[in-house]
Amino acid sequence: MLTPTGDARPVERAVVDDIVGDFEPETFLWIVFHRPDGGARVWYAWTAGGHSLGDDIDRRALAAPLDAADWLHFMGRHVERRTRGRIQIDAHPLRPILADLQAGVQAPAEEGVRLRRMVEMAADLTGQTRPAERPVRWVGVGPALLITQKAKR
């Protein structure tokens, strides 16, 4: 039962659970709730079979090793974008991502260069140390990696 509070998370959780039912099995969902104050909250969700397949993809990608430029490339290649009012839903079917990974697909070199420049510029602007050669590792499509990263923030 939902009761009025200042916390939107229970309502968002119910909406996420409803959204999951709109997609095929083995899909990773990146759901953004845009708030009226300009902020946003991101939710991750997986349809049936998506948890284990996403974790398997992450293990393979990290072993390859792929980085954030590769992750952005894969996410852009395999996305279905929908909106529901202020909610943006990016659905990523995981089987095509696995197929790309197994075929050795990687981001074009210039995408990696652009990402590195952006990370270096952000580090310079914020006074942080520039990262080592591979600026950002594979972000993830499975709960083990994504939820661990989110908990560290």
Image (tube, rainbow, N blue to C red):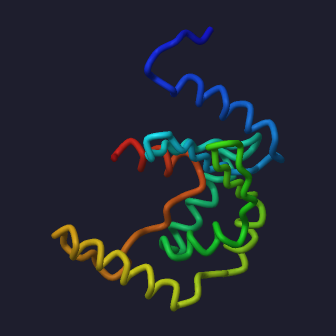
**Mark count:** 0
In this rendering, position of residue 32 left or right of residue 28: left
Look at the picture and state if 81 lies above or below 143.
Answer: below
Determine the residue located farthest toward the front in the rendered image: 36
At 51% from the left edge and 26% from the top edge, which residue is drawn?
A: 8
Q: Quadrant of residue 114?
A: bottom left
Q: Quadrant of residue 13?
A: top right
At 75% from the left edge and 57% from the top edge, which residue is drawn?
A: 93
Work out which quarter of the rendered image holds the N terminus and state it. Answer: top right
Residue 62, percent from left and from top: 51, 66
Depth check: 133 or 15 in front? 15
Look at the picture and state if 110 lies above or below 116.
Answer: below
Look at the picture and state if 3 lies above or below 88.
Answer: above
Residue 6, percent from left and from top: 43, 20
In this rendering, position of residue 49 left or right of residue 63: right
Residue 10, percent from left and from top: 55, 22
Depth check: 125 or 86 in front? 86
At 73% from the left edge and 38% from the top edge, which residue is drawn?
A: 19
Residue 76, percent from left and from top: 65, 70
Depth check: 72 or 62 in front? 72
At 52% from the left edge and 90% from the top edge, which residue is drawn?
A: 109
Determine the residue located farthest toward the left in the rendered image: 127
